[in-house]
Amino acid sequence: MRMERIERDDTHMADLTVVCTDPDTDERSATGQTLAEGGYEVVSCGSLAEATEALEAHSVDCVVTEYTLPDGTGLDLAGRVRDRSPDVPCILFTNESSSAIRTDRREDVVVEYLPKGMPKARESLVRLVGNSVSQCRQVGYPLPDDEDERLAALAQYDQPGMETADSFDRLTALARTHFGVDVAFVGLVDAHEERFLACAGENWETVAREDTMCTHTILEDELLVVEDVDADPRFRDNERLAKLDIEAYAGVPLRTPGGAAIGAFCLTHYEPRSFSDAELDDLERFGDEAMEQLELRRMLNERDDTGAETGEAATGSEHS
């Protein structure tokens, strides 16, 4: 086999090189093409030996590999990456189940795991590559221990059209009135910013992740309550919060059925204030309702995608 270099789409600004290793020619081509369309330069390899050569020949930012290779495993490749470039992230993009991967043989190696069988797996891989590289670089805000898994889960819920869903508008409007606060919102936290699906009381669209309080909320098991922003050392010097006139905050993480915190349901107020236990219980209920709406939309989107694929397959068979 020979190594192939797939040039990235020049309309993207990313300048990252990814080594994509898969012994299956069709799988390797499809994955490499998706990564290239996502803005990455891709070095495509079919074996452990070829990938090792690529590591020596190129400045590599990330490695994506199938687990089973003709001359070793993806973990063997990750081990070689670790020896050469400890900061380069490795992703097992594989058909193997997690239980079949012999991690006991390479306990010194840390990799991310993304199954090929999940919905829109290659699209999620593009995000995971960027997020893994970003995480390896210094950031000005805390990251959850499961950041890559969290972002992979977010990709299933952050679908086009969700920001215009009337149910989120009604829910945040009701919350704003119920709690008597300045603003109530539903936000999804991605690798670099928080995007608001609905925001009653303001017209916020996005806030950089280092500036949003929800970056801290998704680290919590239950709630984050800040009665006086100026008295909290995490936030008192945050100029963005001052411009948004946020002096009090209460937020609850939005957790998927698998436990990933993909965003938050939050209340903010223009002056310091406290929240009673009863109010916080109600806030958790609002958060549960928002997550149920997101889960419903995820399932409907998955059903629509499956139906579209089935229809295309049926149309193709009719014309064959």
Image (tube, grey):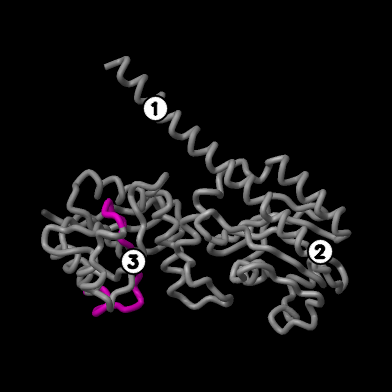
Q: Is residue 43 visible?
A: no
Name which of mark 2 and mark 3 comes first in the sequence: 3
Q: Is residue 249 above or below residue 3?
A: below
Residue 32: image x %, image y %?
Answer: 30, 51
- In the picture, the quarter occupied by the C terminus is top left
Q: Which mark is residue 310?
A: 1
Q: How far is the residue under mark 2 from the one under mark 1? A: 48 Å
Amino acid marked by disc 2: Ala
Residue 285: image x %, image y %?
Answer: 72, 55
Does the segment drawn in magenta span residue 269?
no
Q: How far is the residue under mark 2 from the one under mark 3? A: 47 Å
Residue 14: image x %, image y %?
Answer: 43, 61
Q: In terms of depth relative to the viewer, which is nearer, 208 or 281?
A: 281
Amino acid marked by disc 3: Cys
Name which of mark 2 and mark 1 comes first in the sequence: 2
Residue matched to label 2: 278
Q: For the point 28% across and 78% down, which residue is it? A: 108
Query: Quadrant of residue 110 in the image?
Result: bottom left
Q: How far is the residue under mark 3 from the one under mark 1? A: 34 Å
Q: Is residue 264 visible?
A: yes
- In the picture, the quarter occupied by the N terminus is bottom left
Residue 292: image x %, image y %?
Answer: 63, 47
Q: Secondary structure at mark 3?
A: strand
Query: Quadrant of residue 182 in the image?
Result: bottom right
Q: For the point 75% across and 67% down, which residue is it? A: 250
Q: Residues within 10 Å of mark 3 (few under 14, many from 20)?
A: many
Q: Is residue 285 above or below residue 210?
A: above
Does the segment drawn in magenta span residue 95?
yes
Residue matched to label 3: 62
Q: Secondary structure at mark 2?
A: helix
Write the start and end of the magenta stretch as one range.
80-97
Amino acid marked by disc 1: Thr
